[in-house]
Amino acid sequence: MPLRSAQWYGGQDRNAYIHRAWMRRGAPADAFTGRPQIAIANTASDLTPCNAHLDEVARSVRDGVHEAGGIPLDLPVVSLGETNVRPTAMLWRNMAAMATEEMLRANPLDGVVLLGGCDKTIPSLLMAAASVDLPAVVVPGGPMLTGTFRGTPLGCGTDVWRLSEEVRAGTLSQEQFTRSESSMIRSRGHCNTMGTASTMALVAEALGTVVPGVAGTPAPDSRLLEAAHGTGRLAVELVSGDRRPSTFLTKGSFHNAIVALAAIGGSTNAVVHLLAIAGRLGVELTLDDFDRIGSRVPVLVDLQPAGRFLMEDFHRAGGLLAVLREVADLLDPRALTVTGKPLVDHLADAPIWDAEVIRTRARPLVEEGGIAVLRGSLAPDGALIKPAAASPRLLKHRGRAVVFDSIEDFHARVDDPDLDVDADSVLVLRGCGPKGYPGMPEVANMPLPTKLLEQGVRDMVRVCDGRMSGTAYGTVVLHVAPEAAAGGPLALVRTGDVISLDVEARRIDLEVPAAELAARTPDRATVEGFADPRRGWQRLYVDHVQQADKGADLDFLVGSSGSEVTRESH
C-alpha cells in the first residue's frame, strides 16, 4: 500500500520538488521515499504545567520512530491547561480537536503519536484522530508523584477543595493553607488523584488507543520514556498495517471504556468526552449506555476523591490491567487495541500487588459505584451523579431549592448570613452549561454556605448544568440537560420549589405541577446571566455546541472527513 506522504513527496514535478526541498534541511534523500512520516502531536506548554515535560517524552518517541525506520516530525498543537485558562478549558476542547484534525490532514503525514495529559488534551487529540482517521496511538503524560503536608499525602485538586472548605469553616488557618500550596505539586505530571486527567489516560487505554499497561505510569518514572520509545516503534507498525482508529474502535471498545470508568471510580467528565469521541467515529453511544453498562460495576480502586490513595500507589499496586482482570467477564472480548490484539489478551499477567489500593472483586470499595444517569422533570435529557463520591444518606433526598442564576450570583450570595438555607436545602446553580457560560465550567461542586460549614455540614445536594472537576466530591447532580440556556426546566426553578432526588430510581424531579411550570418564563436575572459573545470562537461555539448528553461537540464537527486532500498548494 503506498504511503499517504508520497502524494506530496513522490514524482519529479515542481510541487514535489517544493515539498521535498523545504523539508530536506540535512535529511537524506531516502527520507522521502518509502519511509513513514510520523507526526508527534505534542501538547507541551509552559502554560499547561501538567504537560510541560512532554518535550522529553517526545524525544523518546522520536528515537522509537527512527529505530523502526520512520521519520518523526514534531507537531506542536493547541494545549489547554485546566488550571489557568479562563473562562474554562472546555470552551476550547472542540477548537483544539478541530485544529489538530486539520493540521494532520493538511500535512504529508502517514501516522501520528498523540501526547497528552491535562484534562482536555487527550480527549481533543482523540477526537481529532477519529475524524482524520490516520493511524494513531496515545502516550499519556502520566500523574505527578505524591506530595505531603504535615506528614499527610496530598491529593491535588481533591485536597484543594477540602482544605479551602476548612479555611472557610475556621478549622484551618489561612497561613497553613498557603503553606500547603508548595507541598501539593511535588513533580512533573498531571493530577495524582482519580481526576479527569488520570481518568482519561486510563479510559483511553481501555478504549484501545494506548499500549496496554502504559497509562498511569508516573510522569517522572523512567519507564514512561521506555514506553514512549516503544510507542514510536509501534506507530510505524500501525502505518504498515493500515491500523487506523476506524479499523479497531467499535461499540465494544466503548463498552470496555465504560466498564473501566466505573471500576476505577473515574471522573464524570469522561462521559462527555467519550460521547464526543464516539460521535466522531459514528459509533452510536448514549447516556443510557453508561448506566446500562457501568452503573452496576463495582468500584475497585481506593483512590481520592472516592477513596484514600493516589496515582503513584495505583501504579505500584498493579495499575489498570490489574483492575480490568478483576472485571474481565464484564469486558467485550472482541474489542481490539492499537497492538492488534484484543484488550482481554493483555490481562493474563496482571496481578494485584496491593489489595488495599486495588480491591478484589470479592471486596470492592463500593458494590455498585459507576456513574448513574438520572432523568425526570428537572432533566428530561439526562443528568449525572457519581455515587462513589456522594454521601450515601443524600442519595435519596427531598429538599427546598435555593437558586443562583449565575456563578457571579452564587459568589455574591452564598456566604450571606441572611441567606435562607439549611442543611436540607438543594443548591441550584444554572447558566453554566455549554451555551450558558459558555463552555460548561467545573463549578457544579459549589462550596457550601459558610454558616452551614460552621455548623459542621460538609455535604449537600447540589444541582447544576455545568461540570465538576474529576478531583471533586460530594452529592452533586451535574450535566443537567437541556441546560437552562437551551430552554431546559432548570431555567424555571424558583427558590422554595421542592426538588426530589432518588438515585436508586434514577430520578431527579422538580415538584411543580406541569401546568404551572408551563406557565413560567425565565426570570430576567436568569437570562441576563447567559453568555452572549459577539464574535470569534465563543460566538461560533454558542451557536453550534450540542448539549452535554451529546458530548458537547459542535454540531458541524460530528463525524469524520478522513485524510484525503485532493488539491495542491502551488
Image (cartoon, grey):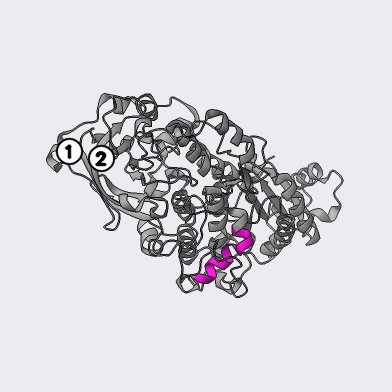
Q: Position of residue 86 (x, y in %)?
A: 52, 31
Mark 1: which amino acid?
Leu
The residue carrying pointer 1 sits among few (fewer than 14), some (14 to 19) or many (20 or more) residues within 10 Å by Cα, namely some
Left or right for 29, reference 551: right
Q: Earlier in the sequence, mark 2 or mark 1?
A: 2
Locate residue 164 relative to residue 239 in the image: left or right. Answer: left
For residue 315: magenta?
yes
- Quarter location, residue 149: top right
Residue type at mark 2: give it. Answer: Pro
Q: Name the residue under label 1.
A: 517
Q: Position of residue 82 (x, y in %)?
A: 55, 39
Q: Nearer the viewer, residue 85 or 181?
A: 181
In the image, which residues are magenta?
Answer: 314-326
Residue depicted at 70% across the width and 62% down the height = 234
Give the image location of residue 181, x and y in percent.
60, 35
Disc number for residue 436: none
Magenta residues: mostly which secondary structure? helix
Identify the mark at residue 489; answer none if there is no mark: 2
- Residue 163, horizontal then vertical, whole percent: 50, 38
- In the displayed structure, would residue 177 be above or below residue 388? above
